[in-house]
Amino acid sequence: MLASMKNTFRAGAGVLLSAALAFAGTKTDVGAARIAGTAKDSSLSGTARFEEVKGGLKLTLALSGAPSGTHALHIHEFGDCSDSGNAAGGHYNPDGAPHGNALKDGKRAHPGDLGNVTITDGKLAFEAVLPRVSLNSGRRPVAGRTIVLHEKADDFGQPVGNAGARVACGVIAVVGKKNPERK
């Protein structure tokens, strides 16, 4: 009986080790959004890249042709940029949390609140790890939603931050896979 238990244990341990090794080599999804100005004559354009990392979802954002100054950046609930970005709906807030800055207070603010970005000479290069969200799994996935740049800075007032109109918008989509070993 003891020999049988040892063999069962070895077999179980082998299965767990195989599963762990398979998971370690699993490719992770990569997301992207092509961002465009919401006005018909806008030259604003850019890209956002989303990648699962330790601690959340890494966002790498590049914009050009944007109005200089400080602007609010949010993830909105729907994947639709029509109607000057208004079809994107409200901020992504799956937990009904108060408005704030998820990058500074990720435990209290809702995950659609990415704070403010400063655009200089029409250009922006921004990178941050978004806490408590994922690309397309878990409780707070952002794929199929939008990333939105607003005309004004977010004042962090309730319920939405008074950031004004939506000047740029892009739908977040899963676009491929990345090996976790690659940087």
Image: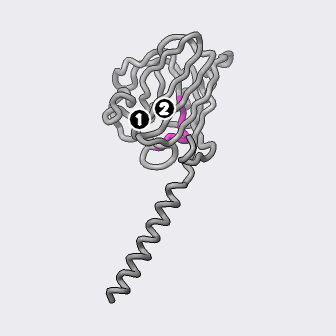
- Looking at the image, residue 69 sits to the left or right of residue 156; the answer is right
Marks 1/2: CA–CA distance: 8 Å
Label 1 neighbour load within 10 Å: few <14, some 14-19, many 20+: many
Residue range corresponding to the magenta coloring: 141-147
Q: Using the image, determine if residue 174 lies above or below residue 155.
A: below
Position in image of residue 94 (x %, y %): 40, 40
Q: Amino acid under label 2?
A: Ile
Q: Amino acid under label 1?
A: Pro
Position in image of residue 165 (x %, y %): 51, 19
Q: Mark 1 or mark 2: name the one nearer the start of the chain.
A: 2
Q: How is the image coloured?
A: one colour
Q: Nearer the viewer, residue 137 or 53?
A: 53
Queried whether the magenta region covers residue 144, the answer comes back as: yes
Q: How many marks?
A: 2
Q: Nearer the viewer, residue 40 or 42?
A: 42
Question: Image quadrant of residue 112?
Answer: top left
- Looking at the image, residue 115 sits to the left or right of residue 124; the answer is left
Position in image of residue 132 (x %, y %): 40, 40
Question: Image quadrant of residue 80?
Answer: top right
Q: Where residue 75 is drawn, which disc sits there?
A: 2
Position in image of residue 100 (x %, y %): 35, 27
User: Which secondary structure, mark 2?
Assistant: strand
The residue shown at (57%, 12%) is: 67
The residue shown at (50%, 57%) is: 23
* Residue placed under numbered mark 1 in the picture: 111
Q: Using the image, determine if residue 26 lies above or below residue 106.
A: below
Whether residue 80 is visible = no
